[in-house]
Image: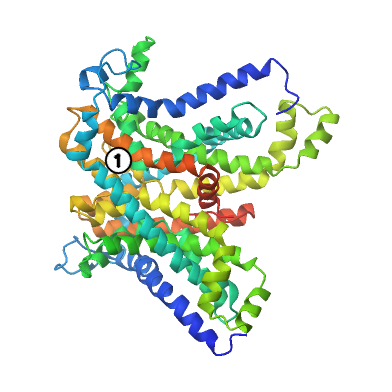
Amino acid sequence: MTNRKPLFMPLAYLIAIIGSAMFLYPLLFTFQASLKDNAEIYNDKPLALPTQWLWSNYSEAFRVGKIGWAVLNSALYAAVGTGLALLLGVMAAFVLSRLRFRFREPLYLYFTTGLMIPVFSLLIPISRLIGTIDGFNNFFVMVVLYAVFELPFTIFLVTGFMKGINRELDESALIDGCSPATLLFRILLPLAMPAVSTAGILAFFSIYNDLIWNVLLITKDNLFNISVALMAFIGEHGTTRMGPMFAGIFMTILPTIVVYLLFQEKVESGLSAGAVKE
Amino acid sequence: MYGRRIYWTIGGFLLPVFVLYTFVFILPVVQTAYQSFFSWNGIHSVPMKYVGLDNYDEMFRSEEFYRALRNVGVFIAASFVLILPVAFAMALAVTSKMRGRRFFKVAYFIPSILPLASVGLMWQFLLKGDGLVNSLLGMVGLYSWQHEWLGEPSIAIYVVVVVNAWISFGINMIIFSSGIVAIPEDLYEAAALEGAVGWKRVLYITIPLMKETFKVFSVLSVTQSLRVFAQIFVMTGGGPNGATDVPTTMLYNQSFKYNNFGLGNSIGTFIIVAGFLATILLNKLMNGKAGRA
């Protein structure tokens, strides 16, 4: 801010720096502790660097906790789930934004109603549904579920954006003999990329972070995502040796930090759009 | 311009989405509501038994349910007394001409992108009796402040709420920032001529012009508080002794721990209705924009 009194600035910086420490220090501590043994984690010098850097904690998290595998699983769930959500969402958004037909408005309302429904209220019927189709421990089933949960927001965002694209484009494309599919995927989709990528980032993060559906529908450890693998690792090996637990936690958060640092602006606008839904 | 082709287009593009969405999202909503009138123990071969309003009777009579509602209330209250002022101050800092504002923005936002389960487990470790928080308090000599933070029923919910605030300061900072940068610069210049500088410009220009943003925040703080789940699930599981239960964790525990699926469904119905009402009423009240329930 301009026009500040000179006295004010140092104070503002001090507060801003203390604030950063409050957010970053717990993560830094987690990293430090991930390289220590219990004796060092619990001694009276929690701020000290490890005397010996125990990278073996990480190999234990890999081997015993299968955290590396879980990170890969989460990334796969997120990538495929997001891809499916975007494909389905974009097709629906095309119809809801570019075509004129009788039930368009009610259908749009129908799809965006999902925005108001917390998915936690659906735990019981969905686990029953998955039970009746014998779909437990099934990657494909998980991905479809994840994609559908992301649909309302994707449709909401992309439909809104596509409404703003000039309609004359459609007419000239169709007159030139374009099929509706070509019109959508070759012409409209590239133009709608800002909205599609925002929806995609939000979907990716929320699927990567999923907890409850993996808890509910997966029992085989080769399909565990990060949340369930971490809980299982900590549950089984307890807190007798904290180093590997912190290593596991750090392994699951590092990819999200890297993705964020690579696409800062996009992630910030994506996640806040997800919250606000303007 | 599509002619008859329009029906093929609608059918081909919309039908798969419609079917999936209906079966996976809308039908379960109907089932939750319908099955809340039945009692069921979760075993497939055992049929459901119609019990009328018994589940709701049990729900509205149980003290645990009101405690869960009160805990949601604590989350909502914390949004206004803790998250709102801090996130707003953070937004002022990162939209200012301060040096290093980009770094501060990244630092403040990082907790919002981390996996909830990982962050929850991390804080669970840091808040243990022999964890970082207590050792830091010990280092500065505040032994009497040390607690079993998540283990004492009287304070556990406040600790969970503070951890939740730590997570969501960043995202709310971004929401406030976009409100702040939307205010045209020349308004500030005009105000500066009238003598509005420093705190006065925040008080008389920024805050009044951000009414819309604050409305959005208010809707969000209520609807998001109804959705809190993962943080509590990994940190306390609703314990100690139900002290940190919210409706979502109560639904999970009643159904998948105690096999009381009827009660679980009535809680689920309550969450759906509350989510709808909160979103619609608050938006009507605020006459603002839609929020995620």
Examine the rendered structure and indicate whether residue A44 appears above or below residue B246: above
Q: Residue A136 appears at what percent x and percent y?
A: 21, 61
Q: Is residue B244 visible?
A: no
Q: Residue A186 appears at what percent x and percent y?
A: 54, 70
User: Which amino acid type corresponds to the residue marked 1 in the rendered image?
Assistant: Val
* Element at label 1: helix
| Chain of the residue displaying label 1 | B
* A209 with respect to B258 (left or right): right
Q: Residues within 10 Å of mark 1 (few under 14, many from 20)?
A: many
Examine the rendered structure and indicate whether residue B49 appears above or below residue A53: below
Residue at figure coordinates x 38%, y 26% from the top left:
A28
Quadrant of the frame with the N terminus of chain A: top right
Residue A76 position by quadrant: bottom left
Residue at figure coordinates x 47%, y 42% from the top left:
A260
Quadrant of the frame with the C terminus of chain A: bottom right
Examine the rendered structure and indicate whether residue B188 appears above or below residue B258: above
Q: Residue A108 appears at what percent x and percent y?
A: 53, 70
Q: Residue B176 appears at what percent x and percent y?
A: 60, 40
Residue A121 position by quadrant: bottom left
Residue where numbered disc 1 is placed:
B234
